[in-house]
Image (spheres, helix red, strand yellow):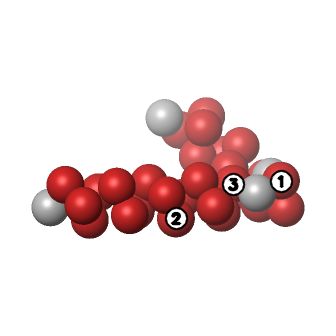
Amino acid sequence: MLTRLSRMRDERDSGFTLIELLVVVIIIGIL
């Protein structure tokens, strides 16, 4: 998990922000 978070922070321009938004939407959907 920590390695993934570090990679996401280092590669924001790669489009990880979209993945983060999708994850948040999924979490909200579950809740």
Which of the labelled discs sits on residue 16, or is there none? Answer: 3
Residue found 61% across the figure and 34% down from its top: 3
Q: Position of residue 1 (x, y in %)?
A: 48, 35
Residue found 59% across the figure and 53% down from its top: 19
Residue found 52% across the figure and 65% down from its top: 21
Q: Give the alpha-carbon distance from disc 3 to disc 1, as whole Å.
A: 6 Å
**In the rendered image, the vertical position of residue 19 relative to residue 28, given as above or below:** above
Which is nearer the N-term, disc 3 or disc 2?
A: 3
Which of the labelled discs sits on residue 1, or is there none? Answer: none
Mark 1 and mark 3 in contact (Cβ < 8 Å)? yes
Which of the labelled discs sits on residue 14, or is there none? Answer: 1
The residue tagged 2 is: 21
Amino acid at pointer 2: Leu
Secondary structure of the residue carrying numbered label 2: helix
Q: Is residue 11 left or right of residue 18?
A: right
Secondary structure of the residue carrying numbered label 3: helix
Residue found 53% across the figure and 38% down from its top: 2
Q: Quadrant of residue 17?
A: bottom right
Q: Quadrant of residue 28?
A: bottom left
Amino acid at pointer 1: Ser
Front residue of 31 and 1 = 31
Q: Position of residue 15 (x, y in %)?
A: 76, 57
Mark 1 and mark 2 in contact (Cβ < 8 Å)? no
Q: Give the alpha-carbon distance from disc 3 to disc 2, as whole Å.
A: 9 Å
Which is nearer the N-term, disc 2 or disc 1?
A: 1
Q: Is residue 30 left or right of residue 22?
A: left
Secondary structure of the residue carrying numbered label 1: helix
Residue most extreme to the left: 31
**Label 1: how many Cα within 10 Å (few below 14, some 14–19, many 20+):** few
Front residue of 14 and 11 = 14
Q: Position of residue 7 (x, y in %)?
A: 71, 43
Q: Give the alpha-carbon distance from disc 2 to disc 1, as whole Å.
A: 14 Å
